[in-house]
């Protein structure tokens, strides 16, 4: 447990650093890195996946709008990104959302939202499936995922779409 808290604190420090100007993740891509305790998730989501957060309805999500809608965004992410193992639904623990601004213009517009956390106690040998329900404003985006269990030498790539929102992992 201490290891998880330490790791999440380290990620939070990296995410909140104002000196960082590079994206943490390529848009509409994600990774699941497995170890004996579960799977660490990092995924970049298009902010248009959260139309209710766009308070001024201008088609863009600003940093202020993100702050105002943050608690709802957490709820939506928990509802739309999860893993299942048989009939058991596994939620993201230690969930962090990091808004990333565009590198061009005035940098007030959020370009992507990076989701980080961990699925604790998932077993890659027990019918594990990853689910994502975010595909942008028109459901026209796709999510390219990479799952990796380095110690066991397992690697898998899969693509999720609005029509195929889940995939078996390993």
Image: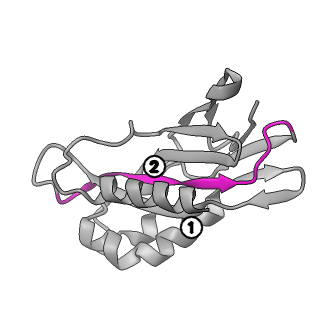
* Tag 2 secondary structure: strand
Quadrant for residue 123, please give it: top right
Instruction: Name the residue that disc number 1 marks.
Output: 76
Magenta span of residues? 108-125
- The answer to whether 116 appears left or right of 63 in the picture is right
Instruction: Check the image and report above or below for 130 versus 96.
Output: above
Position of residue 78 measured from the top left corner of the image (x, y, whole percent):
61, 65
At 20% from the left and 48% from the top, the residue drawn is 20
Tag 2–tag 1 contact (CB < 8 Å): no
At 54% from the left and 37% from the top, the residue drawn is 31
At 28% from the left and 60% from the top, the residue drawn is 16
Q: Magenta stretch containing residue 156, yes or no?
A: no
Position of residue 89 measured from the top left corner of the image (x, y, whole percent):
79, 59
Quadrant for residue 110, please give it: bottom left
Instruction: Check the image and report above or below for 100 versus 29.
Output: below
Alpha carbons under labels 2 and 1: distance apart: 12 Å
| Name of the residue lying farthest toward the front | 2
* Tag 1 secondary structure: helix
Position of residue 49 measured from the top left corner of the image (x, y, whole percent):
47, 56
Q: Residues within 10 Å of mark 2 (few under 14, many from 20)?
A: many
From the image, which quarter does the N terminus lie in?
Answer: bottom right
- The answer to whether 107 appears left or right of 64 in the picture is left
Count of all numbered marks drawn on residues in the image: 2
Question: Magenta-highlighted stretch: main secondary structure?
Answer: strand
Return the residue nearer the eye: 58 or 144.
Answer: 144
**Label whose residue precedes the other's in the sequence (2 or 1):** 2
Return the residue nearer the eye: 153 or 51.
Answer: 153
Instruction: Name the residue that disc number 2 marks.
Output: 45
From the image, which quarter does the C terminus lie in?
Answer: top right
- The answer to whether 41 appears left or right of 9 in the picture is right
């Amino acid at each position: 447990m201490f290891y998880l808290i330490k790791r999440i604190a380290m990620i939070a420090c990296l995410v909140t650093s104002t000196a960082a100007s590079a994206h943490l993740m390529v848009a509409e891509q994600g990774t699941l890195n497995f170890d004996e305790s579960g799977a660490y998730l990092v995924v970049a989501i298009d902010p248009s996946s959260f139309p209710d957060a766009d308070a001024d309805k201008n088609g863009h999500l600003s940093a202020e709008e993100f702050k105002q809608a943050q608690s709802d965004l957490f709820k939506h992410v928990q509802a739309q990104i999860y893993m299942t193992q048989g009939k058991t639904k596994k939620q993201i623990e230690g969930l962090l959302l990091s808004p990333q601004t565009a590198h061009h213009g005035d940098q007030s517009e959020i370009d992507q939202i990076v989701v980080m956390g961990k699925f604790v106690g998932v077993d890659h040998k027990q019918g594990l499936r990853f689910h994502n329900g975010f595909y942008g404003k028109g459901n026209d985006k796709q999510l390219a995922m990479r799952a990796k269990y380095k110690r066991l030498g397992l690697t898998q790539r899969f693509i999720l779409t609005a029509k195929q929102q889940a995939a078996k992992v390993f």
